[in-house]
Amino acid sequence: MVGKDVVRGALTGAGLAAIGWGLYQGWGLSHPLLNLYGWITFWLGVPSVFQFAHRVFGYGELGKNLAFFGTVGLWLFLHMALTWLWRTRGRVALPTALVLYLLLSGWLAGLIYTGLLALFWWRKRGRTHFRAAGGRGGVSRRKLLAVLGVLATRNGRQGAKARSATPSRIAWDRVPGLSLEVTPQGKLYIVSKNPAIFNPNLKGRPYSLEVGGLVEKPLKLGLEELKSLPASHLWNTLVCISNPVGGDLIGCARWTGVPLKFLLDRAGMKPQARWLVFEAADGYRESLPLVELPAQALIAYAINDEELEPRHGYPTRLILPGRYGMKQPKWLTRILVLEREEVGYWAQRGWSRQAVIRTLSRIDVPRPGAQLKEGEEVLVAGVAYAGGRPLERVEISTDGGLTWQRAELKPPHGQFAWQLWALPWRPLQGNYTLKVRAVEVGGRVQDPVDREPLPEGASGYHTVRVRVR
Ligand SMILES: Nc1nc2c(c(=O)[nH]1)N[C@H]1C(S)=C(S)[C@@H](COP(=O)(O)O)O[C@H]1N2
Ligand SMILES: [Mo]
């Protein structure tokens, strides 16, 4: 009999998760499975797990997805237990489920899920009747699932090529292996707390951005209204705080949107206003002290003159120059002005609260382990960024950091744009350890101490070993 509970429980759990996915994508209803995942990553202490997963799986999506599969397993197990309860202790099963769903996802979703579960159970009992009477039982349920599935539309990936060139000794757009100075949207890294299928897709859904809390005049603006307000452009480098030294969770683009200051001025601050809190459609939160809000911060709706793709935050996201990506919520739905801080999603999990970008530099070419030919000139080249603090120079060492030479530095597109750098190099035979470091105006040299990304972002010099024959 317990074997049947296992099968039924798993089917029930899977069915609820699927219907819930439709409700989440279609109407933005809180999904208990996603919240369970949030809890688990919270209580397991993502920081240490993250560092571990980082080593074992690299810094891609694998670790996150494994954690998610674990959550799915737990979710199914919970429904097996509930199914068993329902069979053996009948009456306590539904209240238990109610408490579980309420805890996981609040009253609205909690009631809806309990209702759905009751429906599942009731149908399971009823089905024997229906079967005898002509088997109509499963049909409407299948229809419901199909309708809900259709509600969520997914979007294909595309990205236009964008290149830019400035006259210089170096043809910047033709250095083999060097990053594009402007990252096309389709090539910009993607990071989200959610497994990909749970990223909100707000395309075709009614949308409005609220500005509320300690303001004189709360605002509620649709996308078209936002677009009709005075727009600003900002060159901004987006980099994830979990980007390791030399990593590729970084890109630079030209963002378009409404200056956040403009919206706040329009709403009017009350005297007690101290903090900005940002809320997103996936339940993500971040906050920032009002006094630290840079004038350039945007509520962005376009990148490189294209509409934001769903995975990059359609219809709007915050662009907060100088801070890591975690402080730039995608799928923005609400901005609250408060008296005190609300600790952000990742900050709750041990990451930095301020998340100020550390000065970084990366060698794009040559690649680690490259075999070069003696006497042939190559360009050592890469990118550097100091979080909006102007760069004075970028230096390269070919002897593991003993001596340094100055690379050519391409002028940036803007204060918050990364910079390309390159250095012609004609090596003799041997093994070389290349290193790069950036130096800010005023002489502050990039931090050489090797640090893991957690909690304040990685530091240390990107190092590449090559062989010349
Ligand atoms: N709503 C929401 N916004 C979010 C996140 C998220 O999980 N949910 N992740 C943040 C993190 S950690 C980063 S690094 C950036 C990544 O933005 P991108 O995927 O557009 O490159 O989005 C940020 N904004
Ligand atoms: Mo991030």
Image: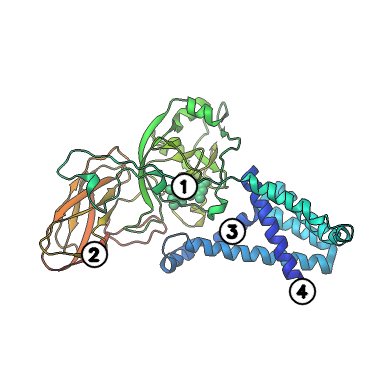
Estimate the spatial distance between the alpha carbons at disc 4 and disc 1, rounded to whole Å.
45 Å
Which residue is label 3 attached to?
A: 37
Provide the secondary structure element on which disc 4 rests: helix
Q: Amino acid at mark 2?
A: Ala
Q: Nearer the viewer, mark 2 or mark 3?
A: 2
Relative to 37, say whether 418 is above or below: above
Q: Amino acid at mark 1?
A: Arg
Q: Position of residue 69 (x, y in %)?
A: 57, 64
How far apart marks 2 and 3 lie (CA) works out to 41 Å
Q: Earlier in the sequence, mark 1 or mark 3?
A: 3
Residue nearer the viewer, 395 or 253: 253
- How many numbered discs, if any? 4
- Mark 1 crowdedness (10 Å alpha carbons): few <14, some 14-19, many ≥20: few
Q: Position of residue 382 (x, y in %)?
A: 25, 52
Nearer the observer: mark 4 or 1; the answer is 1
Label of residue 370 in the image: 2
Cα separation between marks 3 and 4: 26 Å
Q: Which residue is mark 4?
A: 2
Q: Give the Cα separation between the discs numbered 1 and 3.
A: 26 Å
Front: mark 3 or 4: 4
Classify residue 118 as left or right of residue 354. Answer: right
How packed is label 3: few (under 14 Cα within 10 Å), some, or many (20 or more)?
many
Would the CB of label 2 be found within 8 Å of ligand 1?
Answer: no
Label 2 or label 3, whichever comes before in sequence order: 3
